[in-house]
Amino acid sequence: LNKVYDWFEERLEIQAIADDITSKYVPPHVNIFYCLGGITLTCFLVQVATGFAMTFYYRPTITEAFASVQYIMTEANFGWLIRSVHRWSASMMVLMMILHVFRVYLTGGFKKPHELTWVTGVVLGVLTASFGVTGYSLPWNQIGYWAVKIVTGVPDAIPVIGSLLVELLRGSASVGQSTLTRFYSLHTFVLPLLTAVFMLMHFLMIRKQGISGPL
């Protein structure tokens, strides 16, 4: 084992990385409220794990989506638990994100030199809200259907390009299979990928600049 470790150590300098992580200075003013961002990240990881598990059974078609969700809840082993954890962790993620934003704002975490960290955080907030909008439609029940119809109809009020945006979101002039396919793709691939990228940027900047000081 030592030889294997030495082989990796020679190429990756694992010990130097470990020393940097374990010896990072933590300001004395940091308290439990500074953990809200980390809790949000934990909720996101739970979302990824439980969401991935449900993709084994979920069918993104307007004729089978609702039935597949019912199957997950009533017949798939621990399906009810996985979906329940997914739903509750989604709510927890939104709540923790909102509290995190308040904490950062009240402690001046958006000020120089943390402006870009704040910007990436705002983007992550928009992505989190987008998760909620797209995920709400996937069961394709009455609530999900009408929610999608209302949300995708909002851009229609925009002059000139409104109707084009509506068709872009829905995939056609009306809500249907194309809409569900697009929302499923956004929810399970596009949004998680963008969130992972912006989270990496967010944490790297925090790592580089350090935690913002007290007011």
Image (cartoon, rainbow, N blue to C red):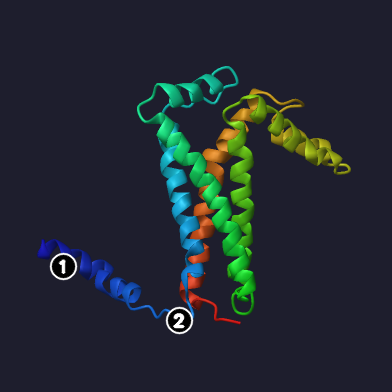
Vertical order, 164 against 40 (above or below): above
On the rendered image, what quadrant is the C terminus found in? Answer: bottom right
Work out which residue is located at the far front of the displayed protein and give it.
Answer: 32
Q: Position of residue 210 (x, y in %)?
A: 49, 77
Element marked by disc 1: helix
- Sequence-earlier tag: 1 or 2: 1
Residue 120 appears in the rendering: no
Name the amino acid type tagged 1: Asp
Q: Position of residue 208 (x, y in %)?
A: 47, 75
Work out which residue is located at the far right of the displayed protein and give it.
Answer: 159
Q: Position of residue 207 (x, y in %)?
A: 46, 72
Q: Which residue is mark 2?
A: 27
CA separation, marks 1 and 2?
Answer: 34 Å
Q: Left or right: where does residue 164 sit relative to residue 139?
A: right
Element marked by disc 2: loop
Quarter holding residue 97? bottom right
Quarter holding residue 184? top right
Which residue shows up at 41% across the image and 34% down it? 81
Name the amino acid type tagged 2: Pro
Q: Which residue is mark 1?
A: 6
What numbered label is drawn on residue 42? none
